[in-house]
Image (cartoon, rainbow, N blue to C red):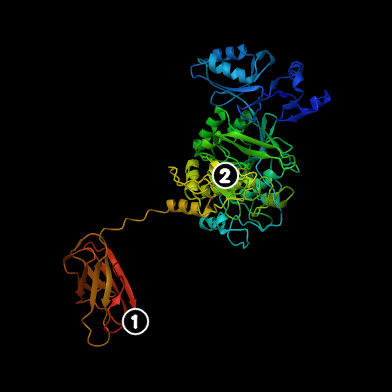
Amino acid sequence: KSTDRFVIRQLPRQLTDRGYVLHDQISSHSTLVRTDPQELDRLMDIVRTEAIAHHLYFWPGTENEVLLTDRVLIRFQPAATDEQINELIARYALLVLRTYPNGEILCQLSNQTDMNPAKLVCCLMEDEQELVAMADMDLNFRMKPQAVPDDPSYERHWHLHTRMIHPEVSPLASTYCETAWQLLGSYGNSEVVIGVADDGCDMRHRDFDSVAKFAGWGAFSGSQFLLGLDPGQMYRRGDEHGTSCAGVAAAEVDGLLTVGAAPGCRLFPIRWETQSGQYFVSDSKFRTLLDTIADQVDILSNSWGASPQVNWSYSVIQRVKELAETGGRRGKGIVFCFAAGNENCPINHTGNQDIPYFHDPQTGRLLTSRYFSHNLSQVPGVLFVGALASTGQRAHYSNYGPGLDLMAPSSNLHTYGFMRVPGLGIVAAEGGSHLTDDFGGTSSACPLVAGIAALLISADPQLTALEIARILKETAGKELDTTPYPRRANHPAWDISPVYEDGSFQDTGEPEGSWSPWFGFGKVDAEAAMRRVLQAQAPAQPAEPAARISIGAALPNPVGGDRGREMVYLFNTGSAALELRAWSLYDAKNRRDEVPATTLEPGGALAIRLQKVRLPNDGGQLTLRDAEGRVVDSVVYTADQVVKGRLLSFVFPD
């Protein structure tokens, strides 16, 4: 528990008016207040007369904040009656804010509840087991966009094709989207919708100006999620992150500015409330978002997060699981894409080594943790996406370790600013119909994978979200650069934890193939994934017959003494013997000779001297029919192919 900070359900301007100046807004309704440790309890007693306030807690053994709200999520036992539920709500002086479709409720504590949310959850789980199946705190998270800026002036769209020649670009870093478009025969289907939850989107941008480019849109205002508001309210100048993410996913092919991975697909932008680069996200808000878009999108791209841990409530995890399996516009699941993070730290890891996850180059402040956890990374159908530099190396900042699924091309930057590292940025849309050539981070990698997933759905709308996630992992490229970055002698563990100092691919028993702690299952490969999908759609080829009889060669009738000595050779190119009974050969004038009755073994040949059939030296045709009159083989030859006294070859057995 913090000795000098607490959380109050009031906004900074209200606190400033009362003389509190050391504060930081952490949600649309709450503020973190810093005070003298000696004054903490007295001050909290004072403010609690006006608003709900809680101590700031930390996860055990770490400096990782637990930002309590005044809300809890409760799921009741199936046998609980409405009367029992209402009695419990009244007994704990709770206010019901929202009821979810599966019967869960979001409740707000009051001053009469007489305990903080953490204690209430413990009480519900320990003392109310007959009524309560699950209770979770509705925590706030200080999310930040997962983008890393880099120097401008880079060439365009190296991440979509392989034509760019540059010393810092490897063809292996491309997603080969251009080839995937050619295989698909389009830039994606407009029936496929990509949701982009971020800081909004400039919906008037020229990269999104086709008719009905947006399948819908919405924004949070406090705890309310508003759909269909004025498009101008979806963008605030300076908040460019969401516009860039939407552009990487689906900017149009119109010869104007930038191109996304799935230009023909539609978008559904979602705006979180933000301030000073932080996104105001909580369990209840995310749950509200999930319920709203449950049947509106096919993919949801989330280029935001936090480290060392983001562990969502049971309610959120279960809802994501449900939607990954049966949600979405097609009822076949939503593909969830999350940015893996830019802190150069593990996604999931527990150990006894202090691993950095934040470094301030100006002050030298360093935050470390021994515990890293992101429970959404364990949900099937959820893809955590890391960043691959244009060189084919792991981007220096990209988070790693268990939980990492895929890599996608993005920018490169040294996490701690110690040195320049090679790598180009991503060209993407920016507000005001502008573009940027320095977009990057796992923020850029995430919507790129979302766009490629949209292409696969365009190719086969019957694919489930779980199948798409599996295909992307199974077809991911593994020819990547595992060269580690140079380390500084005084900070040897800062470049990547020694726990994961080997980036090679290993057999971990996963059905999708080998896995690397640096690259997950590999770099997303749109071409390979598209080929896999299209091959699965191709009509099944008839099974190769066990016996196959072919007209392999013939001796036509050159001028001179060979007349009447024409020969035909039949071959069994199959794997089984076949009886030839009542078979016949025909020429172009439908003259007929019977094939001698025989059994032709695999690899065997039968020479037939023709009696009525003629093979003239100026070209002809020969047809073989079985006893039912079905054509077994037919060959045609021209005068140019005829050489006196030589066999004319058609098909030779293997």
Task: State yes or no: discs 2 and 1 in contact (Cβ < 8 Å).
Answer: no
Residue 609 at x, y = what percent? 19, 76
**Is 135 above or below relative to 604?**
above
Q: Residue at x 31, y 58 (%)?
A: 544
Residue 202 at x, y = what percent? 71, 45
In which quadrant of the rendered view does residue 39 lie? top right
Left or right side of 288 for 236: right
Q: Gap in Å between the C-alphas at discs 2 and 1?
A: 63 Å
To which residue does mark 1 refer? 639
**Is 358 above or below relative to 586?**
above
Left or right side of 379 for 578: left
Amino acid at dot 2: Val
Earlier sequence position, callout 2 versus callout 1: 2
Q: Residue at x 24, y 64 (%)?
A: 629
In which quadrant of the rendered view does residue 216 lie? top right
- Tell me if mark 2 has few (under 14), some (14-19) or many (20+) residues whose alpha carbon lies within 10 angstroms of its own: many
Residue that lies at the very extreme toward the left in this rendered image: 597
To which residue does mark 2 refer? 385
Helix, strand or loop at mark 1: helix
Residue 429 at x, y = what percent? 68, 50
Residue 203 at x, y = what percent? 69, 45
Q: Residue at x 21, y 76 (%)?
A: 610
- Tell me if mark 1 has few (under 14), some (14-19) or many (20+) residues whose alpha carbon lies within 10 angstroms of its own: few
Whether residue 271 is visible, yes or no, is no
Amino acid at dot 1: Ala
Helix, strand or loop at mark 2: strand
Task: Name the quadrant of the C terminus.
Answer: bottom left
Q: Residue at x 83, y 25 (%)?
A: 17
Whether residue 337 is visible, yes or no, is yes
| Camera-side residue of 24 and 258 | 24
